[in-house]
Amino acid sequence: MASVQDPCSFASSSKCTTKHLNLSYHVDFERRVLKGKVALTMEVLEDRCSTVTLDTRDLTIFSATANGQSAKFNMGPEHSFLGTPLEITLPFELSRGQQVIVEVAYETAPKATALQWLTPDQTAGKQQPYLFSQCQAIHCRTMIPCQDTPSVKHSYYAQVSVPQGLVAVMSALRDGQAPDPEDSSRLVYRFRQPVPMPSYLIAIVVGALESREIGPRSLVWSEKEFVDKAAFEFSETENMLKTAESLVGPYVWGQYDILVLPPSFPYGGMENPCLTFATPTLLAGDRSLSNVIAHEISHSWTGNLVTNKTWEHFWLNEGHTVYLERMIGRSMESEQFRQFKAMGGWKELQESVKTFGADNPLTNLVPSLQDVNPDDAFSSVPYEKGFALLYHLEELLGGPVVFMGFVKSYVQMFAYGSATTEEWKAYLFTYFQDKVDVLNKVDWNAWMHTPGMPPVKPQYDTTMADSCIALCGKWTKAGEADLGAFTAADLTTLSSHQVIEFLSLLLQEEPLPLTHVKRMQEAYDFNSCINAEIRARWLRLCVKSRWEEAVPKALQMATEQGRMKFTRPLFREVYNFDKFRDEAVRMFKTHRAAMHPVMLDLLSKDLKVDPTSC
């Protein structure tokens, strides 16, 4: 496969590529640093290779060696979000095909963006500190000097020294534990990941963790306060894994564990191999968590096994994963359910395009990330515009069974490697060589390289959405005299998915009169709902309608958990309510110390606050 320059990496991945990474960490909670050593086994790709360049950011480098010999190193100029290139001069010259082991001793910074260090007060147990990482997209370089690009995939081995009483887990198979030979008050946990994977999937968690078995190849991990509830909520995991395997082939990662993180985790889930990370907002006693877990399970094939070659091709990861997630929903629920979820996804895409602006190049399916931080580009666009393209192709090429055959073949073709949009498209034309005339009629430029909504709007089956659309219409058309007709019975036949859809539809309309949202609360009592998906939409609806009593509730939800899907829209909604703009900024400044670094950066931009001035 062709070499591609990654605009988000300094690493010399065209000169040499990492095949294996051997990592040892000493976790220091007092100083909030990882003291580490990494040995990178690298294969040389060109003759007369005498230097290696790695990505770093905010790392202190102590020494470097190559095949055991001392090596000179130099830190290049610092870039605001890409970090600092680490150039290591080898004490010898290498030829194409040779391997070298480059070892670097280093230490992370307390402000490393991949790591969040929690005090005991920020945990459920209140007794022990907690550490977790989030490397996607380009944060691994803040905890390991590496080739931090998804075009490079490698296996890894790790040893992690932690204080006794704490447990370490990683995105790998557990390989035992033993007392730390250098400190009897500590334990060393060992891990091995034999399947090649990109750096952004390296993950570590250290805390007072417990586990419960939820299937023949699955444990759920969390603090003991949540572990039994989590085990109950995630009991369908094995069924989902088997369903995914029936669609796209064997699961190659061995173990599939789920770890429920503390509330500050900024995403719904993260597909770290062998150890999916999940937000605690899923533990709400309803079925909306199935979407997140189906999505993360799907990543085991689309994203982890076949990976976007650079972050400009992120839709290859996420569009295919949403497609597979919804095919799992089709198998476990119905085709109507898949259509219903696709309709909801289209609305999320409309909201992202509206937030960015319809002319913003970051709404391209394949955006340019030259001088762009991938975190700033994060939205539902690669997920839902990507899905819409795949669904459009499915309709053109023969339906879900036929197109799922292509997705499975694409995964097998590019397994253990990385792909670009051009490589995906070339394979699509090869696979459907008898339908090239159909593919040639697709407006590829409009889909891939044009901002805004897609050129084609799929006509989804509205069966499950009709009742939501009807109820939304009743509320938007109701006059003052009609409000008494609304009762709790309106929702009795609706699933939680449909209630979410109803509120999402209302959010797309002009704000309801204040009398209407007050009546909605009387009739439906959404204020007492614990389902985070429903609660976040309801509170946004209230703030949009300028219900002042809802503002404290909205800000409470925005700060008691840190999932970007909820926190950023809630803060933005309050910020847009002129009377409470200063209160939104004040609450952000009050809670910023507990926020994840990625959340802190993006929310400060949303609220037009300099994060360094807080």
Image (cartoon, rainbow, N blue to C red):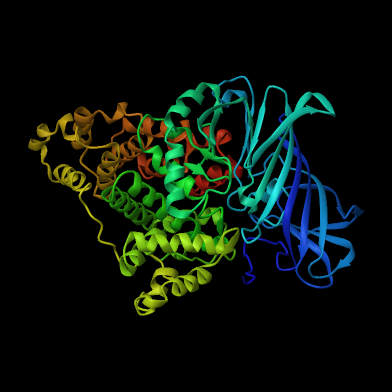
User: What residue is shown at x 55% (from left), y 28% (from top)?
Assistant: 222
Closer-to-camera residue (476/225): 225
Where in the figure is residue 162, as x and y percent of width and height? 73, 29
Percent of width and height locating residue 21: 74, 50
Q: Answer whether residue 261 is visible to the viewer in this image.
A: no
Q: Is residue 128 above or below residue 269?
A: above
Is 484 left or right of 327, judged from the image as shown?
left
> Is 494 on the left-hand or right-hand side of 220?
left
Pinpoint residue 478: horizontal percent, then vertical percent: 12, 42
Closest to the observer, 548 or 389: 389
The answer to whether residue 377 is above or below residue 455 is: above
Which of the two residues, 26 or 613, is positioned nearer the viewer here? 26
Left or right: 227 as drawn, with respect to 142: left
Viewer-nearest residue: 426 or 460 = 426
> Residue 574 placed where, x, y %?
38, 40
* Residue drawn at the location 75% of the way across and 60% of the way down: 77
Residue at 44 percent of width and 69 percent of height: 448
Q: Is residue 220 in sight in this rendering?
A: yes
How many badges with numbers are in the image? 0
| Residue drawn at x 84%, y 29% as measured from the top left | 181
Give above or below for 434 relative to 128. Answer: below
Quadrant of the drawing holding the C terminus: top right
Quarter of image, res 189: top right
Left or right of 39 in this view: 573: left
In the rendered image, the quadrant that contains the N terminus is bottom right
Most extreme residue toward the left is 481
* Up-down relation of residue 565 to residue 447 (above or below): above
